Amino acid sequence: MSIVTKLSDTLVKVSGSVSSVNASAFEEELFAAILGQDLTIDAENLTYISSAGLRVLLKAKKNLKGQVVIENVSPEVYEILDMTGFTEILTVRKALRQICVDGLKEIGHGQNGHVYRIDPDTIVKVFRPNIDYSMVQNEIAKAKSAFMMGIPTAISYDVVKVGQCFGVVYELLNAKDLAGCMKEDPEHLEDYVRMFASVMREMHSMEISSEQFPSARATTLGALPYTKGRIYTEEEYEKVKAIMENVPERKTFIHGDCHAGNVMLQGNELMFIDLAGAGCGHPIFDLMSMYLTGACHQGELFQCYTAEEAYHIWKVFLSTYLDTEDEAFLAKAEQQVALFSCARYLLGLLRIPDLMKPEEMVAYKAKFLALYDKGIEPLCF
């Protein structure tokens, strides 16, 4: 019976027990299966590995130019790898606990996934199928860094599997997503919006220097060349580039997807979730999310409102965030946010090809091109 099952050029599954008796066969099968420079070993069915088997892994590590990852490792096998120092040599991931969300109440959602309540003390964010493990780890690392910096965010407990998707379990006591609170308590809708805008403004007053949070401007400009011929024509690309280059660098903390569905209300405190896109930069990167859900009535969050009601939410949010009722200033700020948002939103097609329908893509292009023709000025806020 084979010890190694090839799943792809860089992914194999190892089963059974690997000892001195079959270590030679393990080595032969493993190296026959590897065609790439990276190697991922699914160890879900690996029950034991001896020093002879570990030497084969060490040989694979030395021969390959890329990384060697062992995932779905049982507690027993993990203990062997840890005691022998292999957890420091290779990337080793323990087997993830499987949970089921059938029957659980959904309390929030965003582009990256859905949030469900497990019990009074914990929630689970279930990522969409296209989100890989590295992105989940990235979100957890950013959430921990943000928490230590004083950003109000939930504490992550555990990475789990929900079917074939990854999930993260968070501590969040009796919290609801802000969008749900707004819907369930329309009498205080504007109070919720103003609270959100004030907390976001306070968050944007924090300067960060952590390497954990990349420059949103640099990341955007780095991805932009991949849009040529796929999303934008050469002429459109140059215009989008000019729009993005007009945004100055800042050391301001930004959430990266800051809308009412990614904010939880716990008592009188707002807490941010979904920090996968967190970084540093100009606040316009965060205002974009509220502009799209409000002024553009995009996505599911505000579909319970008419377009006019959703736009009113955006107007209340913007005036509170900028702390002014000056209509001329607000109109200028909204135009600049609209230009930026409509141009940058299309970049999401690089990561999520079915993010929008073809007719929506045409509409966003038309809007940013019309705004571009009015001219680009330094941002007014």
Image (spheres, rainbow, N blue to C red):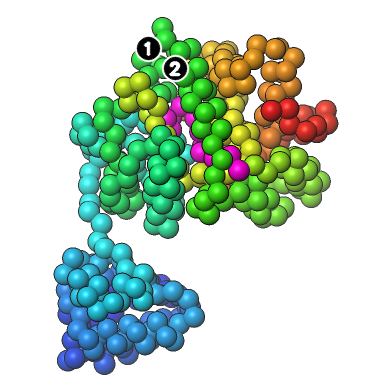
Pick whichever, 69 or 250, lies toward us.
Answer: 250
Upstream in the sequence, badge 1 or badge 2?
A: 1
Residue 241 at what x, y percent from top left?
75, 46
Q: Is residue 164 above or below residue 173?
A: below
Query: In the shown orientation, is residue 377 left or right of residue 59?
Result: right
Query: In the shown orientation, is residue 220 left or right of residue 65?
Result: right
Residue 254 located within the stretch drawn in magenta: yes
Which quarter shows the N terminus? Answer: bottom left
Magenta range is 251-263
Residue 106 at what x, y percent from top left?
31, 31
Which quarter shows the C terminus? Answer: top right
Q: Do the residues under discs 1 and 2 have CB atoms within 8 angstroms?
A: yes
What residue did someone put label 2 on?
192
Q: Amino acid at mark 1?
A: Asp
Residue 319 at what x, y percent from top left?
61, 16
- Rendered image quadrant of residue 287: top right
**Residue at screen point 75% across, 40% down:** 246
Is residue 236 visible from the viewing direction of this image? no
Residue 65 at what x, y percent from top left?
49, 80
Q: Amino acid at mark 2?
A: Tyr
Q: Is residue 171 above or below residue 134?
A: above
What residue did someone put label 1 on?
185
- Rendered image quadrant of residue 73: bottom left
**Residue at screen point 34% across, 51% down:** 166
How far apart are the alpha carbons under marks 1 and 2? 9 Å
**Residue at screen point 32% across, 45% down:** 156
Q: Is residue 160 above or below residue 366?
A: below
